[in-house]
Amino acid sequence: MPCPVPRWDGVFYCAGLFIYKNMPSCLLWNLGFPGPLQITAGERVIYYFAPPPSPHVEKILQRYRTSRYSYPDVGITWLEGSTLAADAVKKYKMDRYRACLGNGAAIFQDARQRFANWKMFPSKWIRIYPEKPEMKEGGVVGILAKVLGGMWVLNLCRVVRTVIEERRVAFSYGTLEQHAERGEEKFSLAWSEGDDSVHFEILAFSRPNQLLAKLAYPYVRHLQKRFGKDAMQQMLQRERRPG
């Protein structure tokens, strides 16, 4: 019987089920909370058949709060132009997305509010934990993404650095050992003094960290590119205000 999911999602969903059935020591089913089943791959990447409740995810965040980064080049997204950054391009896939949101103080203030509330993440297929995350250095963040024809995968990151200035805000987070990928991603919002323009930018360095991420790498890259484009669209949507 064919899998009831389309295209590449269906291929990797079926592959995941095959691996599970044939490698029970690698993928463990358990009832970790009241509700849908979850799959834990080597006590690292966690897959769900439905979004888990916030208290469950917050317990996981607490559990991994002291987890190490999964990559050695912590801070790499802040070192553009350096020798270290040039070497990183050889080791990682680099993605950069940039969009002009408009001009002027009103555009910047509106975008700044959205930025502070992490609205760049598309809510249709990505959820952030805790529900009201802060741009606080050292804070652990859970990123729950809908993948594999309806499954959800939870990955953890730690905020590496935060910059809050009058005309610029930025922060980056790096992947923890539990994450399917390894690398760092920086989000920045800037209001130019020169031409009054407001730009939102994402810079990311990544490479696979887990076996399933390596096996499904074309699909992983598809999701990464989808996120970049969706994040730009999210920030281009201004908040609707009464009046």
Image (tube, rainbow, N blue to C red):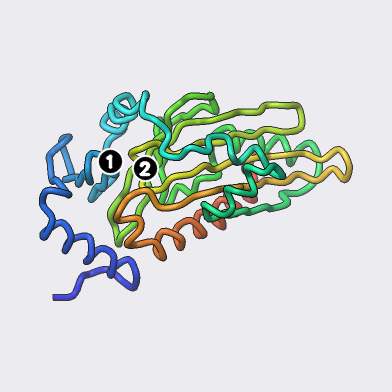
Q: Position of residue 115 (x, y in %)?
A: 60, 37
Q: Residue at x 31, y 71 (%)?
A: 6
Task: Quadrant for residue 76, please give it.
Answer: top right
What kind of element bears circle 1?
loop
Between 34 and 193, the one lying in front of the other is 193
Q: Residue at x 37, y 24 (%)?
A: 66
The residue tagged 2 is: 179
The quarter holding residue 15 reads bottom left
Q: Quadrant of the C terminus?
A: top right
User: What separation in Å lies between label 1 and label 2 (alpha carbons)?
Assistant: 7 Å
Q: Position of residue 32 (x, y in %)?
A: 16, 36
Nearest to N terminus: mark 1 or mark 2: 1
Q: Which mark is residue 44?
A: 1
For residue 125, above or below residue 109: below
Along the viewing direction, whichever of 75 and 134 lies nearer the viewer:
75
Image point (22%, 70%), residue name: 4
Amino acid under label 1? Arg
Q: Quadrant of the N terminus?
A: bottom left
Q: Specify few, some or many for label 1: CA neighbours under 10 Å numbering under 14, 14-19, or 20 or more.
A: some
